[in-house]
Amino acid sequence: MKLLGKTALITGGTSGIGLATAKLFVREGARVAITGRDASRFEQIKAELGKQATIIAADVRSVADMRNVSKQIEDEFGALDIFFANAGVALSTPLASTDEASYAELMDINVKGVFFSMQAVSPILREGASVILVTSFLNQVGREGLSLLSASKAAVRSLARTWSRELLARRIRVNAVSPGGVDTPLHDRGRRTPEEVKARKAELASRVPLGRLGEADEIAQAVLFLASDESRYILGAELVVDGGISQL
């Protein structure tokens, strides 16, 4: 029970890494709030997570939504020990064909969403709280057609450092977890058939030294470490969990 008695907020917690982390946090004793946009899934997720979890409809692109989330958590929990800024999107953005709408969607979710979510919850973070951001192996390498996704994750990597310095007086630790390719519903977006999804996942797995995509639970375990007191001497760092793709 590494998180017994602690409170946590996870954005984008209704699927993939966010949901896997929420389930793990609950098992480890935390009271957890998650945000998401797909209200049709809320009842099912509430049943999976149990009474230790609160689900809040919110879009990280909306500053007003995230301020409302912060207010609701303050009313229910009092304060936060853990903030996992997980909500994100992955889009292909080739230089020649990317339009302004695609730019806005990706950067608004991956950068603006992280920044203003943090701004909203910062006042209710307890002294000594742990904040975990999501970067990507893409901030270490160059991949054709993924310039904006890579740039957005490089920006988030920088935020882990600068916020660690900015919040040092409150002993709030800001770290990042850097996944590689992970088998989540994120890969389904923009692909019309199960065969297309399967082919895309196989292509991604072929690039990984370990020969497979990661699992959401494997990333959740890394987030748990950064959220817990076991990482109390770590701040401004990036924990890479990518099967070796950025290293080998």
Image (cartoon, grey):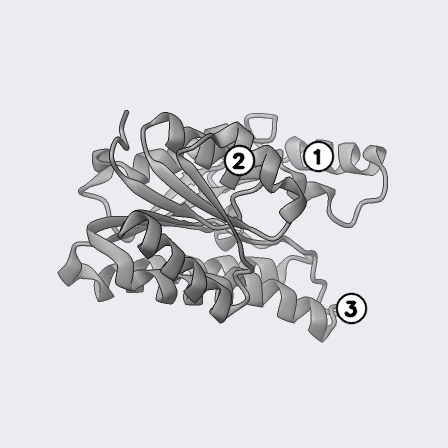
Q: Earlier in the sequence, mark 1 or mark 3?
A: 3
CA separation, marks 1 and 2?
A: 29 Å
- Label 2 neighbour load within 10 Å: few <14, some 14-19, many 20+: some
Q: Could you tell me residue 108's position as x and y percent? A: 56, 67
Q: Name the residue at 54% across, 30% down.
A: 47
Q: Could you tell me residue 222's position as x and y percent? A: 39, 34
Q: Secondary structure at mark 3?
A: loop
Query: Is residue 143 left or right of 164 when viewed as pictured?
Result: right
Q: Earlier in the sequence, mark 1 or mark 2?
A: 2
User: Which residue lies under the disc numbered 3?
Assistant: 97
Q: Earlier in the sequence, mark 2 or mark 3?
A: 2
Q: Amino acid at mark 3?
A: Ser
CA separation, marks 2 and 3?
A: 40 Å
Q: Could you tell me residue 76's position as x and y percent? A: 34, 49
Q: Amino acid at mark 2?
A: Lys
Residue 205 appears anywhere in the view: yes
Q: Secondary structure at mark 1?
A: helix
